[in-house]
Amino acid sequence: MKILLLKPSSLGDVVQALPVLRLLKRWRADAEIWWWIEKDYAPLLEGDADLTGIYRFDRQGWRTPRGWGAWWDTIQQMRARRFDWVIDLQSLARSGLFAWLANGNLLVGLEDHREGAPGFYDLRVPRPHPQAHAVEWYLAVLQRLKVPVTLPFNWLPPRFAAHRSIEQRWHPEGKRWVALAPGARWPNKRWPLEHFTTLARQLMAAHPTLHLVVLGAAADAPLGRVIADAAPGRCLNLAGQTTLPETVEWLRLASVVVTNDTGPMHMAAALRTPVVALFGPTEPARTGPYGQLQNTLQLALPCVPCMKDYCVRQPALECLTALTPSAVLAKVLSLLPTARPPSDSRWQLSWPSAPQ
């Protein structure tokens, strides 16, 4: 059997879709599975034992005639492989068109009408219920295809080369780490930088042997520098300095991860590393840290969740500014005694209930 999965972005969404790959491969070990993904996120999947191959998508190239040749070459390669199933987990106009042009025997996608993508599909899978988590929606696709969703799997298997690289570059062993992820795609999903710096000082005072590591994209490096200055000698600012596999392994090493609603949050949740997730305008029930929704901090304001990428209220961004470092510190301290997850921790999902 040949299967094509389409989930090009964003990073957190790709992570949340990985159980589909894992369970398909556990169900049919002989399956040849390919993934269509934005090129910037491809390193997360490169060398994955469950994948036969990757199609890289250049988001910028899509917008210019110069990139259309590469786009058409990819379509031709997809068609030549004669996929049995094409599964679109992005379900937007672009991915729906790609999925249809791939010309598989069965085209399956989410019944999401934001851009009309379901018009391309042979089989449309609705959200199980309005507040269903994104992971549950993806698992519902497997249920419709009669693929078991109760098989054990390792969501993010260890990447030993990345772990060795971390050991050689930063020597983290023998120390206890709290990872901080201060970035986010939407500015109004970012807990204030001054709150992160206050939290860093409070953690250093509460635990004299604790160390911090700041993780994120290159754009988050200035945030990391400010946080590192608040904890001199005990905070590594690695924003923009790690590969995606190295980021995964840092999150596996961490005792606790304090994070905005962003990609590292979903990675940490997949690894079962304890997460303190800071939410403002978005809905944790649908996109929070899967399996750890009880570790989400969100204020009960009338506007929450607004689901907007900008704030129109006064005082601005109250949903995050009013979430105090002391409240976050208390949550972190409650999780620190928790045993760190084993590197080979496995998931055993049960349907229809999901771990919370």
Image (cartoon, grey):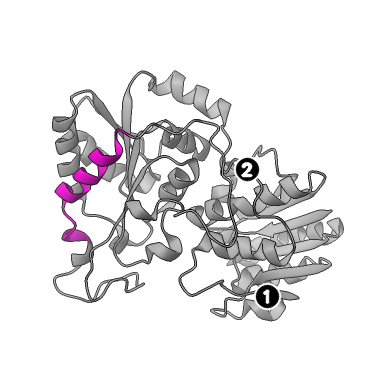
Q: Please state the total of marks drawn on the protein image.
A: 2
188 lies left or right of 4 = left
Other residues around mark 1 within 10 Å, as few (<14) / some (14–19) / many (≥20): many
Residue 316, compared with residue 339, is above or below; it is below
Name the residue nearer the viewer: 152 or 303. Answer: 152
Q: Position of residue 63 (x, y in %)?
A: 58, 67
Q: Position of residue 34 (x, y in %)?
A: 73, 51
Other residues around mark 2 within 10 Å, as few (<14) / some (14–19) / many (≥20): many
Instruction: Between label 2 and label 1, give the one nearer the viewer.
Output: 2
| Residue drawn at x 66%, y 37% as measured from the top left | 47
Kind of residue at disc 1: Arg
Q: CA distance from mark 2 to mark 1?
A: 26 Å
Name the residue nearer the viewer: 228 or 331. Answer: 331
Name the residue nearer the viewer: 198 or 298. Answer: 298
Chain part drawn in magenta? 320-337
Q: Position of residue 277 (x, y in %)?
A: 33, 52
If you read the primary sequence from the N terminus, does the residue marked by circle 2 or circle 1 appear first? Answer: 1
Name the residue nearer the viewer: 194 or 16. Answer: 16
- Quarter holding residue 338: top left
Q: Is residue 329 magenta?
A: yes
Q: Which residue is mark 2?
A: 153
Secondary structure of the residue carrying tag 2 is loop
- State whether residue 260 appears in this view: no
Residue 212, compared with residue 41, is above or below; it is above
Q: Quadrant of the C terminus?
A: bottom left
What's the magenta bit mostly, secondary-structure-wise? Answer: helix
312 lies left or right of 49 = left
Q: Which residue is mark 1?
A: 124
Secondary structure of the residue carrying tag 1 is strand
